[in-house]
Image (cartoon, grey):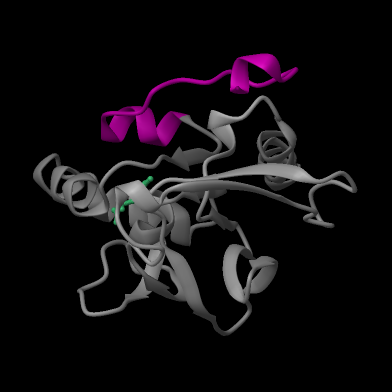
């Protein structure tokens, strides 16, 4: 998806050195407990937290959203940087994964495709956190300063609107 955008050079990030060379980071989906465990094992949790707190733009999709949350219901937080209360696996099991569409005014005037895979939702957005999308009464996209989160997976659609929006956040931070 990032390769389709003008002026964006995507690189995978696995080491602290790579982390220090990038201007913005996407924390992908997957399994948040496993990702958090690996971040700890490879000594990346604290350096990553530091960079985010220093203002590096970050976008967490699904498991990435869970990693950023200050409050994960019934569990200890991982990066614990964003003022959101998150419910993991909120829609049920893998088999309850689903697709939908919605207009997210801040991102695009057109309806956007949304793909939810054993997704979390945000129970509460606190502090400065701005709600970008509520779907059937639950918050599924939010923004707090340099932190963007989506419960769903824009990278599994053909639509680059969210990626463009994030690339713009990164550019704005560099200016
Ligand atoms: N269910 C996963 C978790 O709780 C997230 C799923 C995903 O990233 N698609 O970590």
In this rendering, position of residue 125 left or right of residue 11: right
Q: Quadrant of residue 150?
A: bottom right
**Image location (x, y in percent) of residue 63:** 36, 51
Identify the residue at the far right of this view: 109
Identified at 65% across, 21% down, the residue is 8
In this rendering, position of residue 13 left or right of residue 76: right
Please count the marks in the image: 0
Q: Quadrant of residue 154?
A: top right
**Nearer to me, 130 or 17:** 130
Identified at 52% across, 48% down, the residue is 152
**Image location (x, y in percent) of residue 12:** 39, 23
Identified at 75% across, 17% down, the residue is 6
Residues in magenta? 1-21
In this rendering, position of residue 81 left or right of residue 127: left
Residue 8 in magenta stretch: yes
Please, is residue 132 above or below residue 52 in the view? below
**Nearer to me, 22 or 89:** 89
Q: Quadrant of the C terminus?
A: top right
Please, is residue 95 above or below residue 128 in the view? above
Residue 53 in magenta stretch: no
Q: Quadrant of residue 38?
A: top left
In this rendering, position of residue 154 left or right of residue 80: right
**Nearer to me, 9 or 95:** 95
**Nearer to me, 62 or 167:** 62
Q: Quadrant of the N terminus?
A: top right
**Image location (x, y in percent) of residue 9:** 58, 18
Identified at 34% across, 62% down, the residue is 92
**Image location (x, y in percent) of residue 30:** 31, 41
Identify the residue at the far left of this view: 41
């Amino acid at each position: 998806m990032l390769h389709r955008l003008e002026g964006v050079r995507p690189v995978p990030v696995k080491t602290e050195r790579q982390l220090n060379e990038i201007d913005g980071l996407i924390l992908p989906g997957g399994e948040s407990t496993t990702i958090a465990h690996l971040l700890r094992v490879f000594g990346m949790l604290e350096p990553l937290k530091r960079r985010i707190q220093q203002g590096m733009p970050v976008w967490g999709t699904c498991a990435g959203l869970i990693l950023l949350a200050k409050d994960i219901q019934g569990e200890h937080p991982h990066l614990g940087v964003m003022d959101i209360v998150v419910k993991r696996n909120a829609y049920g099991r893998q088999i309850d994964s689903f697709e939908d569409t919605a207009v997210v005014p801040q991102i695009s005037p057109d309806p956007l495709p949304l793909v939810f895979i054993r997704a979390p939702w945000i129970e509460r957005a606190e502090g400065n956190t701005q709600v970008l999308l509520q779907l059937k009464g639950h918050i599924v996209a939010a923004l707090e300063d340099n932190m963007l989160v989506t419960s769903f997976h824009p990278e599994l659609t053909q639509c680059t609107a969210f990626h463009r929006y994030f690339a713009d956040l990164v550019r704005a931070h560099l200016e």
